Amino acid sequence: MSQTSVDEHVMTTYRRSPIAIDSGSGCVVYDASGTPYLDLVAGLAVASVGHCHPRVVAAIATQAARLIHVSNLYPTAPQQELARRLAALTGGMQVFFCNSGAESVECALKLARKHGGSRKRAIVAATGGFHGRTFGALSATGQPAKRTAFEPTVPGFRHVEYGDIGALENAVSDDCAAVLLEPIQGEAGVVVPDRDYLVGVRGICDRAGALLILDEVQTGIGRTGRWFAYEHFGVTPDVVCLAKGLGAGLPIGACLARVEVAASFEVGDHASTFGGGPVPCAAATAVLDVIQDEGLLDQTTTTGALIKDRLASVAGVAEVRGIGLLLGVRLREQRARDVVSAALDRGVLVNDVVPDVVRICPPLSLSEEEAIRGAEIVAQAIGEVIP
């Protein structure tokens, strides 16, 4: 099927690659002619354990043959098991299941306002932050280019410079229900804050009686070499938002909160028809099993360091930012899109998030050999574009 025949009937909300992906296995995808591509995009950090991992495929097939949907009016064993596993990873947090990262953020925003009561309605977020495309999540997103065409957005949001602890402290007043941040800003070009920034944010929230919500939609579920990126910074959030890598390709999101915060929700306050369905929950539990059993947290740390070290020495590279397998290669020129094209021609998929940053976020199952080969090809692509 040609690109033209597909896009004739699809809204033009994406800038599409010239290749159409037909199949995938591990860290490699194939077009319809069988041409292989080393995938360092992973469906935008989604294919956490690789494409079509046998254990995930088996979990999906087995559950689909048993029960596909029953709604949240009835508990199911897959949902209960996944909730138990996520609670164990977060010190006993309770979960609301949904279908995407934006929905997880929407849940967190509603929970914060319900918890804060009528006196605490403001939400403080950061410039450069990205939290989703639905109206609440978009209002929290600190990128005016994504918001302006859809204004007026939801009121009550304040934006301060990411990493500026003084600006944040000034913005968090008595009417603040929560501070919403990404522990590492992905869509802004993989921006990593100073080591003590989130510790300072935690202290400000505690003094003001505001919740700390961490959007781990892109950074969570092993992406940085730990289950959650906040573990690198020595803080614990009140609420954490997950999606992307949790389902390894199936749509699932999760908003987790400390028990006393989650208790603010009452029956009827929030809902999702498809959220936490048996099939996505079975897949997500298999993902957690694979990451644990195959040692992918340690592997992510190792392969991420290999890529980072190789690309940091390339002449056209200003710096390589990130932790684990969430890396942003900042170029000396605003030629990221050209580098993406040059890498594609050489059989490697990467993507550009801002004009001077190429993002690398492959499956956590990326081998050392694949990491070295991928880094070398990206280095060649950069060398071609920025001699």
Image (cartoon, helix red, strand yellow):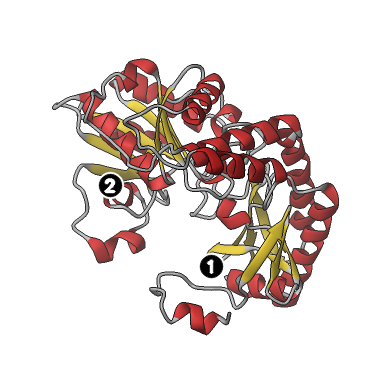
Q: Which mark is residue 355?
A: 1
Instruction: Check disc 2 and give the amino acid type.
Output: Gly
SS category of the residue bearing label 2: helix
Where does the image place residue 107, in percent across and percent down from the top left? 32, 37
Q: Is residue 353 above or below residue 59?
A: below
195 sits left or right of 369 in the view:
left
- The image quarter containing residue 40 is bottom right
Q: Position of residue 310 (x, y in %)?
A: 80, 54
Whether tag 2 and tag 1 are in contact, CB under 8 A, the answer is no
Q: Residue 227 location in percent, x, y?
A: 60, 31
Per the image, the residue denoted by label 2 is: 136
Residue 381 shows in the view: yes
**Residue 71 appears left or right of 371:** left
Q: Position of residue 76 (x, y in %)?
A: 45, 28
The residue shown at (54%, 55%) is 189
Q: Residue at coordinates 61% horizontally, 73% vertically from top-left? A: 20
At horizontal 59% and vertical 72% (from top left) the residue drawn is 337
Q: Residues within 10 Å of mark 2 (few under 14, many from 20)?
A: many
Residue 282 to residue 10: above or below: above
Q: Is residue 189 above or below residue 55?
A: below
| Residue found farthest to the right | 369
Q: Earlier in the sequence, mark 2 or mark 1?
A: 2
- Residue nearer the viewer, 251 or 188: 251
- Disc nearest the viewer among 2 and 1: 2
Residue drawn at point x = 83 percent, y = 48 percent: 368
Give the camera-side residue of 188 and 20.
Answer: 20
